[in-house]
Amino acid sequence: MKTSYQVPKQTVRIEYQVSNSRFYATIGRADSVEEAKSFIQSIRQEMPDATHHVYAYVIGHGSSVIEGMSDDGEPSGTAGPPTLAVLRGSGLGNIVLVTTRYFGGTKLGTGGLVHAYGQAAKEALLALPVETLIVRTLAGVDIPYSLYERVKLLLHEFDAEIDEEIFAADVTIVFRIPSDNTESFSERLRDLSSGQVHITILEENV
């Protein structure tokens, strides 16, 4: 499993024209299917008079992904599949693309539609800035107060993000740590506590 991957940094839109039909490809980030559906719906609401709103999305990355697509009234297989194929080929994750078509009066035919939607998706990708998403592990640790400051420094050293701290008989810290760092952090924590403190993995791939 990859522990980092590229995702869209912002939403962009390009215009592509073929035989008087105008295609507007809007591409952006979605970290869940719900976010992808919300993105798609926002485009529908923005351009309600369009002929079609073809979409595809890839949530996650690598072998653990959720994909979706729609031809939205175009002939079956001519719009959603070529759009999804471009997203798959990009290597990006957490990505959604909606290509909005305004029909220009000239039918493009099956091959023409496949090319038009595929090309619109490719041009949108070329205009898209990306950033690296680090896959993190959600974990927790119970520590004595005497180790609190040193463990906080250790968490900082390993680029962990603290979600919650609970102060009771001991201190419970819930944190998100880059998955690449989990094993090394655990070893350092055992050394620091003379083997008395161990982390508990709460959730992978967060």
Image: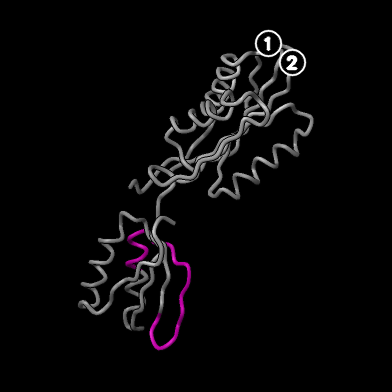
Please state the horizontal and vertical placement of residue 75, each as a whole percent of the image. Answer: 63, 23
Q: Secondary structure at mark 1?
A: loop
Question: In this view, which residue lies farthest toward the bottom?
Answer: 169
| Visual colour scheme | one colour
For this view, does 143 lie left or right of residue 60? left
Question: In this view, which residue lies farthest toward the right?
Answer: 49
The magenta region covers 153-171
Q: Which residue is mark 1?
A: 19
Q: Mark 2 packing: few (<14 Cα in 10 Å), some, or many (20+)? A: some
For this view, does 206 lie left or right of residue 141? right
Residues tagged 1 and 2 counted as in contact (Cβ below 8 A): yes
- Residue 160 among those drawn in magenta: yes
Please state the horizontal and vertical placement of residue 52, each as a whole percent of the image. Answer: 70, 28
Give the image quarter of residue 136: bottom left
Q: Which mark is residue 104?
A: 2
Label 1, label 2: how far apart the Cα atoms are? 7 Å
Identify the residue shown where x is 32% and y is 67%: 154
> Which of 176 and 67 lies nearest the eye of the viewer?
67
Identify the residue shown where x is 33% and y is 72%: 151
Question: In this view, which residue lies farthest toward the front?
Answer: 76
